[in-house]
Amino acid sequence: MKILTLHCDYIRFKAVKKAFKDAPEISEKEKEQHEVKECLVVLTSIEQGDSSETIKQLVEAVEKTAKEVKTENIVLYPYAHLSSNLAKPSLALELLKEAEVKLNKNFKHVYRAPFGYYKTFELKCKGHPLSELSKEFKNANSISTTGKLVEEKYDISKLLREINKTKLDTSKLKENDHRILAHKLDLFSFNEVAPGMIFWHDNGLYIYNKLTEMKRNLLKKYNYLEISTPQIFDSKLFKVSGHWEHYKENMFLTDYEKRQFGVKPMNCPGAMLVFKANKHSYREMPMRLAEFGIVHRQELSGVINGAFRVTRFTQDDSHIFCMPQQIGQEITTLLSMVNYIYKELFGFEYRLELSTRPEKFMGEIKDWDFAESELESVLKKMKMPFKINKGDGAFYGPKIDIHIKDSLGRSWQCATIQLDMQIPKRFEVSYIGEDSKEHTPIVIHCAVMGSIERFIGVLLEHTNGNLPLWLSPRQVRVVSFTDRNAKACEKFVKELREEFPNLRIDIDLSSETVQSKIRDAEMLKINYIIVIGDKEEENKTIAVRPRGGKPQFGIKVKDFTEKLKKELEI
């Protein structure tokens, strides 16, 4: 059994028509639109092998989550898309009814959406750390063990066929979908042997590396120290940080030498240990630690969505350890970085939200009030419009969420700036103040791009794959007009590579027509197509076709290289 719980402001749903011939009949009242407010929606897939035992696990999990988010309204919503191993409809309906009966014993209102029907639905998810949780339950009795060591045998051909089955279904995707662009431009791919994890191809990895290089240069400007922390930690670390209670269900766990370990779902506990490794003075504050940290979070197959929602991703994380009087300047600097990357580099419009103390939080209210007032004060001093999002802060502190708008008018939340006075206390990190006493620093968490994988997906759709020269994996292609111009083309490419050793340049000397070669280059979103024919050889010039533009004839090589220099600099 697989479920996805969503803590929602509301859900509206209406049965439209039967999804299969033998779906149970429902009354006219059940066919009406239903709206449930302040609820926990439980999207549920009943699988083969499920029984009353798995229903018991579901009920316990729902009760725990509902208690944590403080709701008494439960919506049990049959949702087949979470699994490819569904139980027979008769068993699924029987178990859903059993779950409804058991949940009714402990909750004020339990609603079960019609089973076996196509439904329209609309919901608004709250967006706090516990608002989206995916879980899987198994029937322990369905696993038989003999206690004997049995040699495993594999049909390698069959396994390979299953591995090779992974194929992108483009029938419901728009032309500018980042998954289609990634396939056409040979950027990255996916395979079910690693669900929700990106296989970077050379061209895609170039984009990834250039983005991290850009961010590294920006970090140097603001005196950050770059660190790298382990992928796997003893579960004790997450219990100290407070993340265990909130993230355990979505972590990849394993046992090693009779100890429980987890693959990290966030980077901050590791940063705490790096700071804690040495003694610090107030003279070192603020200490800015940056990490391009790879994290893993379990997601059900039904909610994985290309690069937008993955199980493995890299965060351009930073953790700033500072004194209270330094908060304002640090937040100001971070917002300047956000503006540079989002608006100046990529032309995104963005808006800000100040998210305040949630119902379930760590620490003292007076600390929260101080932190929230600091963030609000900075935003007002910078004259940046913002909206207050009450109750949507992280469990350890308030935050500023930055929502960008892409070329299609869609809103994306990528960057976040979080103020944290709780986790430093839990880790007992400190610095020696001017008064020679120990003080607990405040920590500012910030990820400007957020998930780099997600940012690349958004950027690809925002630009329709037309990336700026410095970020483009295919920057220049040189095309021969006829076979007799081949040597001139090779000479030009050699000279350009000598001047620009890292330029992504290739050459097309095929016998295809010039129009065909140009069309092929345009399909690959190449920034500049250079054509050299007899006239260009004679006049020692080149014909330049900028991506999406008209050809420019008689261009001097020096003028073109000067243009390249300017566009390659950021």
Image (spheres, rainbow, N blue to C red):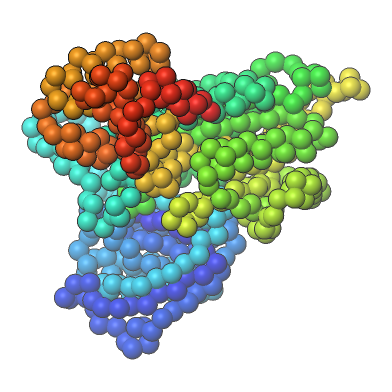
Residue 288 in view: yes
Q: Residue at x 32, y 32 (%)?
A: 553
Q: Is residue 517 left or right of residue 215?
A: left
Q: Is residue 37 left or right of residue 141?
A: right
* Residue 5 image offset from top left, x and y in percent: 45, 58
Q: Residue furthest bottom?
A: 28
Q: Is residue 482 left or right of residue 194?
A: left
- Total numbered circles: 0
Tell me: residue 205, above or below residue 492. Answer: below
Viewer-nearest residue: 37 or 251:
37
Q: Residue furthest right?
A: 435
Quadrant position of residue 57:
bottom left
Q: Residue at x 26, y 13 (%)?
A: 491
Viewer-nearest residue: 341 or 86:
341
Residue 205 in view: no
Q: Quadrant of the N terminus?
A: bottom left
Tell me: residue 87, above or below residue 238. Answer: below
* Residue 118 image offset from top left, x and y in percent: 28, 72
Q: Residue at x 55, y 42 (%)?
A: 342
* Residue 317 image offset from top left, x and y in percent: 57, 32
Viewer-nearest residue: 391 or 242:
391
Tell me: residue 280, above or below residue 9. Answer: above
Q: Residue at x 22, y 60 (%)?
A: 87
* Residue 528 image offset from top left, x and y in percent: 34, 31
Viewer-nearest residue: 189 or 241:
189
